[in-house]
Amino acid sequence: MAYSEKVVDHYNNPRNVGSFDKGDAAVGTGLVGAPACGDVMKLQIKVNEAGVIEDARFKTFGCGSAIASSSLATEWIKGKTLDEAATIKNTEIAEHLALPPVKIHCSVLAEDAIKAAINDYKAKHGESAAAAE
Amino acid sequence: MEQLADNRSPPAWEGRATGGGTAASSPCWSCRGPVGDADYAFCSTCGAVQPPLPITHFQRLGLASGFQIPRDQLDAAYFDQARRLHPDRFATRTPRERQFSQAQAVSLNEAYETLKDPLRCALYLLTLAGRSSIAQERTIRDPTLLMEAMEAREALEEATDLAAVEALAARQRADRDSCLASLQQLFDAGDLDGAEAVTLRLTYLAKLGEDIRLRRMRLAMSA
């Protein structure tokens, strides 16, 4: 199976690889996995006071499609509000990267990682806001 | 079963009486007689090879169902049947018999390869028990499991020499062995929830094992 040009591009030049301090109050961390293929994906967002994702990082151990999906996801969520980022659908990622049917689950994993990171931030934010009062 | 080792199959198309047999399976395609044991590849009446039936891998190998069948038992059961299905034995047979014997051989190999590999065997046992969720494409969020997987893969990524990789390999083997030991207990006790959780961890350890092998090869080649 041949990867699309966009997948190869993200695979060779992944955007936003790395980590934020997951203890930072402004950071939300999503950690998800696809047991069928042993993939594991970490996606982190850094959110400013206005509720906008100002930066994002990812680290993925998996196939080229999983790496490309998470790399693209970090690009797309930057500059979006949490609610906007939450509307990103795996089908948009799959379409943009021209993923073949057998690799659709890689884009699902990326969508789930975004949602997990947002949930983590929201849970954390609720707690820290309560603590700050 | 020795008398069945010879797979003579006179084309008895005239058909014997179909009735009488206690076998639950359909009558032999060749002699119309009772096939005998449903889990056997050859007709017990005329010895003709039969099309593979939808039986379990354990039944196909004539073994009791269970996790990690001792390797010598598994090998003996496999080679016993593989010998009878060897293509040379069917070279001069009809296309139909060749086709059936090939289909039997494919099913037999699939059974053997599945039961030989502990992870595949565990997944198969779970599937037989109606739990096929691990093999399906789905997302998991278990932080303990995923953290362990992420940290192990990061450590491997950062391992720059063979000694460091070997240390990780030793840990992977120890973790894998402990998973296999607890899976044995869990399957024996019929604890499917527990078995599913450990099998999930085993899938990640297997993936780590693959990556360790690749890493080791790359380091060995660049040395």
Image (tube, rainbow, N blue to C red):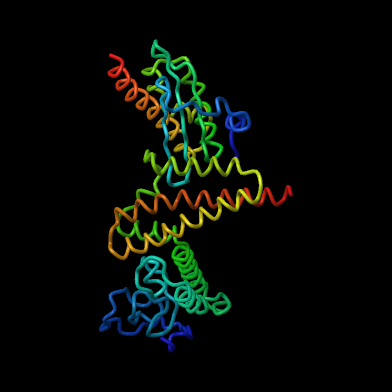
At 51% from the left edge and 49% from the top edge, which residue is drawn? B207
At 40% from the left edge and 15% from the top edge, which residue is drawn? A81
Residue A77: percent from the left, percent from the top? 46, 20
Most foreground residue, B120 or B169: B169
B104 to B21, vertically: above or below: above
Most foreground residue, B107 or A113: A113
Residue A122: percent from the left, percent from the top? 33, 22
In the picture, measured across the screen, residue B130 lies left or right of residue B152, that is left
| Quadrant in which the N terminus of chain B appears | bottom left
At 37% from the left edge and 60% from the top edge, which residue is drawn? B183
Direction front: furthest residue: A132
Residue B16: percent from the left, percent from the top? 34, 85
B89 to A84, vertically: above or below: below
Number of dots carrying numbers? 0
Residue B128: percent from the left, percent from the top? 33, 60
At 48% from the left edge and 86% from the top edge, which residue is drawn? B6
Direction right: furthest residue: B223
Direction bottom: furthest residue: B3
Which image quadrant is residue B145 in? top left
Direction top: furthest residue: A50
B193 to B106, vertically: above or below: above
Most foreground residue, B169 or B85: B169
